[in-house]
Image (cartoon, rainbow, N blue to C red):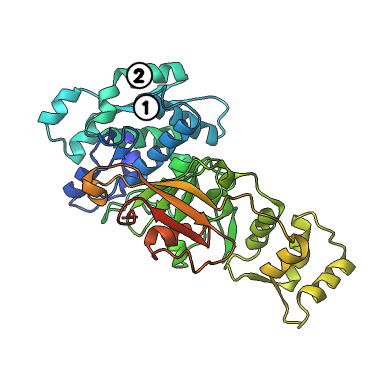
Amino acid sequence: MSDTNKEVVDLVWGRPGGGGVPASLFRRWSQGFVYSEAERSALEQFEGGPCAVIAPVQVFALFFLFIGYFTKYKLAEMCILINRELTNNFHWSVVSCAFVFLHGVCVAALAAEELGFERFHSIIQKRTLRTDAELREVVLSLYDTWKNKFGVLLFLYSVILTKGIENIKNEIEDTSEPLIDPVYGHGSQSLINLLVMGHAVSNVWDGDRECSGMKLHGIHQQASVGFLTLMESLRYCKVGAFLKSPKFPIWILGSETHLSVFFTKEMALVAPESPSEQARRVFQTFDPEDNGFIPDTLLEDVMKALDLVSEPDYVNLMKSKLDPEGLGIILLSQFLQEFFPDQDSVIPDSFPVYHYNGLKQSNHNEKVSYVEGTALVMGFEDPMVRTDDTPVKRCLQTKWPYIELLWTTERSPSLN
């Protein structure tokens, strides 16, 4: 195994004990990019684990479908476009893409030879490509490799080496934690963020935060596609506006163990941030615990951040008005009502939605396809339109608190 391959292995799989990476775990990640026979643009996932790569690739497939690429480009071209999207997010001035491929083993031989972990990593090689034209030629020449056996891992390694191992290590909060969990095989949040945003940060909030003298890195720009998680409904984390409100209405949904995708064609859901939405986002950066209030001592800072009048006398007047009982806190709801009242939402009352889950066993008749439905989003809870309390609904309620979902299938789609 070359030094570069060993660095990639350590970053992705960690440094397992004497037994190495379990064969069952490596087998679960050994699959290609395969589209469902029931839905030509939906990728299939064979076993648990690689959803951390497959779901981000799926959202970019939908992303390119939105902007008209998917009918023109097939899987190999999509991988090129994703590499370019990630390269753009890395802010490189010169395009340089690393493409990882199998050396000395033809695709047909993969079916006959059961490559183990060590053997696989001893025969993969890296090739550095400088232009889209070079990358397209190489990827298309090895098109079958993307679809067969190790396509997911080869793609993942290509992204990692394109980004740069040291660059990734500098962004990960705890470099001792591998990108793939060595016990359960799940992808880390750093891996998901790398593939969605191009940055392998470990957190999902907006901006950076200080904790006990440590700087914890978050998301610094609006994503093209978004991320929501059931863990937020359980108050384990707080997803920031940059991931909750992406440029296109496509979101990865995270459960405790799996990633699926929710999307719609309703572009009003990702309209430019309104003044009240910006105010909410800025206010919440001063309320990292999501308490719904800040100490009144921070009111001046919030007002300055929003370019509101922040002269000391006016700030003190606002403190008295927003905190008449002198409790020393400013509530988010009262702050918004004072400075941004009566702002109508541009979100329609109802719109068609779709859910994707790549696991066959999680789909009706074990056929991977999009589940269609209708979403109802209201500004208040209407008891006349109350649907079941399902994990997918609880996940979506972290963005739209009063969303209700009416699916065309007998059962609600599964997050797992």
Q: How many marks?
A: 2
Q: Residues within 10 Å of mark 1 (few under 14, many from 20)?
A: many
Q: Nearer the viewer, mark 2 or mark 1?
A: 2
Q: Secondary structure at mark 2?
A: helix
* Frontmost residue, 250 versus 297: 250
Q: Position of residue 80 (x, y in %)?
A: 42, 26
Q: Position of residue 158 (x, y in %)?
A: 37, 32
Q: Is residue 348 left or right of residue 81?
A: right
Circle 2 residue: 138
Label pair 2/1, CB-CB below 8 angstroms: yes
Which quadrant would the C terminus be assigned to in this image? bottom left
The residue sitting at 86% across, 72% down in the picture is 317
Circle 1 residue: 99
Q: Position of residue 223 (x, y in %)?
A: 54, 43
Q: Is residue 179 left or right of residue 221?
A: left
* Frontmost residue, 26 versus 38: 38
Q: Position of residue 200 (x, y in %)?
A: 47, 46
Separation (CA) of disc 2 from disc 1: 8 Å
Residue type, mark 1 in image: Phe
